[in-house]
Amino acid sequence: MADETYTGSFYCVKCKEHRDATGKVTVNAKGTRMAKSKCSVCGTNLTKFLPRS
């Protein structure tokens, strides 16, 4: 996986709003793909689980 990114809607649990952001795609130990980013308003970490490809 060569520097894959995800651009789309993340849900911020602190703001309780959907935010559009771009995040880096990572794979955890179980093989789950997820995009990670930061909320542009409060700075909280955003995580979006992605389908397997």
Image (spheres, grey):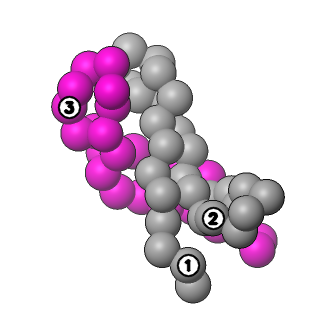
- Establish if 37 lies above or below 52: above
Q: Please name the residue shown 56% across and 45% down the image.
A: 36
Residue extending furthest top?
A: 42
- From this viewpoint, is residue 22 visible? no
Q: Name the residue under label 1.
A: 52
Q: Please name the residue shown 23% across and 39% down the image.
A: 18
Does residue 4 belong to the magenta stretch?
A: yes
Give the residue type that dot 1 points to: Arg
Q: Mark 3 points at which residue?
A: 17
Pick the quarter of the image with the C terminus: bottom right
Q: Please name the residue shown 41% across and 28% down the image.
A: 39
Q: How crowded is mark 2: few (under 14 residues within 10 Å), some or many (20 or more)?
A: few
Give the residue type that dot 2 points to: Thr
Q: Which span of residues is magenta-colored?
A: 1-24
- From this viewpoint, is residue 44 visible? yes
- Establish if 33 lies above or below 51: above
Q: Please name the residue shown 76% across and 74% down the image.
A: 1
Mark 3 or mark 2, which is nearer the start of the sequence? 3
Tag 1–tag 2 contact (CB < 8 Å):
yes
- Cα separation, mark 1 vs mark 3, equals 25 Å
